[in-house]
C-alpha cells in the first residue's frame, strides 16, 4: 500500500516528437496527509509515484528521456502517521531531485 502525491507513468520509449519536461521546481505547501489507517508494512508517503518500475539502475536507458524536476520545496507538511515524506519508492529514478 503506497501513497504518492504526484502520480505518473512513462517508460521513456515513446517518441512524442519533442522533448517532454516535468516542472523544474515544484512547491508543496500546507499539506496534511492522513495516513493513519495503513498496514504495518507501510513505508510512508512519497512525493512521486514509481513512474517506471523498470528504471532501477544505469542499465535502463530511456530512448526518449524526459527532463525531470530539479527541486521540490516542502513547506508546512504534516504526516499523521509520523513517517517521513520521502522522494519516491523508486529512489534511483528521482535521485537527482533535491528538496528544500
Image (spheres, rainbow, N blue to C red):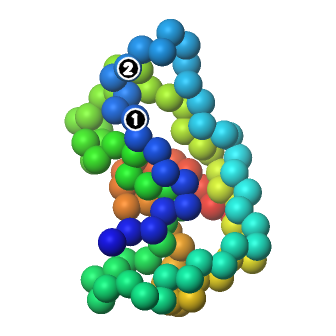
Q: Classify the position of the N terminus by image quarter.
A: bottom left
Residue 57 visible somewhere in the drawing = no
Residue 43 sits above or below residue 23 on the image: below
Q: Residue at x 48, y 72 (%)?
A: 45
Give how far across and how far down residue 72 sits, in percent.
65, 56
Alpha carbon distance from label 1 to label 2: 8 Å
Q: Are marks 1 and 2 in contact (CB under 8 Å)?
A: yes
Q: Classify the position of the C terminus by image quarter.
A: bottom right
Q: Dot 2: few (<14), some (14–19), or many (≥20) neighbours within 10 Å? A: few
Pointer 1 residue: 10
Pointer 2 residue: 14
Q: Residue at x 48, y 62 (%)?
A: 4
Residue 31 visible somewhere in the drawing = yes
Tell which of 62 and 32 is nearer to you: 32
Residue 21 sits above or below residue 38 on the image: above
Give how far across and how far down residue 25 sits, in percent.
70, 46
Amino acid at each position: 500500500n503506497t501513497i504518492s502525491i504526484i502520480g505518473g507513468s512513462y517508460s521513456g520509449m515513446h517518441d512524442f516528437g519533442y522533448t517532454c519536461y516535468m516542472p523544474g521546481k515544484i512547491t508543496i505547501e500546507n499539506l496534511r496527509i492522513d495516513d493513519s489507517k495503513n498496514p504495518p508494512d507501510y513505508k510512508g508517503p512519497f512525493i512521486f509515484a514509481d513512474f517506471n518500475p523498470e528504471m532501477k539502475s544505469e542499465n535502463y536507458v530511456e530512448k526518449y528521456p524526459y527532463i525531470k524536476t530539479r527541486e521540490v520545496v516542502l513547506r508546512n507538511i504534516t504526516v499523521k502517521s509520523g513517517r517521513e515524506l520521502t522522494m519516491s519508492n523508486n529512489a534511483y529514478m528521482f535521485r537527482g531531485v533535491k528538496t528544500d
